[in-house]
Image (tube, rainbow, N blue to C red):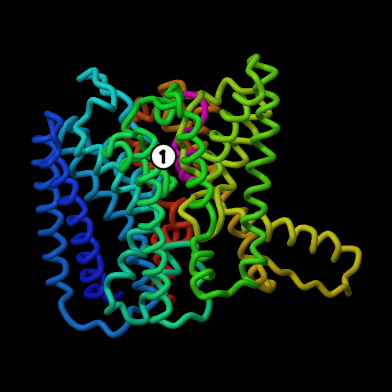
Amino acid sequence: MNFRILAQFLGALLLLESIAMAACGVFAWMDTVPGDVGAMNALFLSAGIVALVGGAMMLCGLGKIDRVPRREGIVVVGLGWVLCGLVGSLPYVLGEPKLDFSDALFESVSGFTTTGSTIMEADPIMGLDIASWPRGILMWRSVTQWLGGMGILVLFVAILSYLGMGSKSLFRNESSFQTGEATTARIRDTAMILWKVYVIITVVCMIGLKAMGLTTYNAISHAFTVVSTGGFSPHNQSIGYYSSWGNGWLIELWLSLFMVICSMSFLIWVVLRRKRWKRLRDEEEGRLFMVLCLGSAVVIAFGVASSQGLDVLTALRQSWFTVVSIASTTGFGTVDYTHWPSYGLILLAAMMFLGGCSGSTAGGMKVSRLIVFLKTARFEIVKAFRPNQVFHMHVNGNTLGSSDRAQTVVFVALYVLIAMTSCFVVALLEAGNGMDMLTSFGCVVATLANIGPGFGDVGPSGNFAHLLPVTKVFLSLLMILGRLELYAILVLFMPSVWRKY
């Protein structure tokens, strides 16, 4: 293991994070709302500490790096996300409401992984709701999601031109983007295009929200968290805060549009840029995602309308926004879906596990894996009766080999196994608190799939504040595990891999 490479890259990553903290400190300094002085001090102090640590690490790894081996690239990704979560918790500890370590870590990791689960609904000691917390801290909370949406390490690849061949390893292991046979220059070019598109979409979303009557602060905060499909909101009621406005339906429609856009593969924008129209016509993952969202919303709407006595349009408005919010793993809320018919909850749970499209800012297992899994199942069933038949499997216009099919099946099986095991672990840790099975399941699916709200006591009207510190740390690990799609974190716990690499 080349520790000089690790020190240099992780140090540079911390310097980038310190810049983001300082920017939020400037916002708190310029903010006209009283009470942000403490937030300003906490953010600037945190930025200074992180910059010093990052600078020291870069000095330890000083020297020219021509290439980054794949092994070091994987470790940078895994440790990079853990490190970002750890140092990102500093503003929550140093500033009001001065959270303890487990709460601060949970909130920070939830931000960077764009999960949206929170312990910040209310402070039992201070008696404050989330809107009463310093706006500088809440802005940092939104910024962490925006950085984590595209992936802070993708930004890392886009900015630092001296990555060399290691950029391909970082890019591939940090995200679900498929690099194919791209050269290093093409990887860097793709990363920059993705961030440009990301910024443009954010600005358009923010301008739209501002035009609909949101304050500049709220427009920026919600634009950051909807484009990243994160779901943090500076209001206790989330988007439900705006539902009673005269144009509340328009705000919900605007946000759902961007949730859908950002649940699609961002590589579509690269395809458009390079005028590869055939690839766009072959996009079956995005079509299936839309069909699933529309179908689920319509089915749930009729059930909600009949069970709660709502008119069909109101029920459709509620179900569409909730389904898109859940399917995109954003987690914004306008209604408490735990009161919906049981079949609706089952559909939502399925959409939680599935998530958005590969190469998007959404979490979950990804729709592309469902497509491969179903086609593989059909292939094996037919093969059992027609062993000599030749099959050619394609997804999004790309040919899949036997290794691709095997990797998908293993991933799905491993994902389900981890989810089941985690439910048992959470229930065991919280046995003294009498946690029920539904809440245990809700904790796991909300964090592993990077959703935000779950079921039971951690549903849309609850939060994670009541959990034990050890449970919050475990769920924080699940968030990172889900965000990096298992392997980049699991491999850190397998030292034999490093010895045999």
Instruction: Assess disc 1: are there few (<14), some (14-19) or many (≥20) residues with their C-alpha within 10 Å of its C-alpha.
Output: many
| Residue sitting nearer the eye, 287 or 160 | 287
Measured from the top left, where is residue 192 in percent x and y? 36, 69
Measured from the top left, where is residue 360 in percent x and y? 49, 56
Measured from the top left, where is residue 22 in percent x and y? 15, 51
| Residue sitting nearer the eye, 15 or 263 | 263
Look at the image and tell me whether residue 223 can be seen.
Answer: yes
Residue sitting at x 51%, y 33%:
442
Q: What residue range appears in magenta?
A: 446-458
Residue sitting at x 33%, y 81%:
164
| Residue highlighted by disc 1 | 231
| Residue sitting nearer the eye, 336 or 478 | 336
Q: For the view shown, which residue lies furthest in the front direction?
A: 211
Residue 450 painted magenta: yes
Q: Look at label 1 and name its amino acid.
A: Gly
Residue 443 painted magenta: no
Q: Quadrant of the N terminus?
A: bottom left
Q: For the view shown, which residue lies furthest in the right direction?
A: 385
Secondary structure of the residue carrying numbered label 1: loop
Measured from the top left, where is residue 152 in percent x and y? 33, 59
Relative to 26, 230 lies left or right: right
Q: For the view shown, which residue lies furthest in the top direction?
A: 309
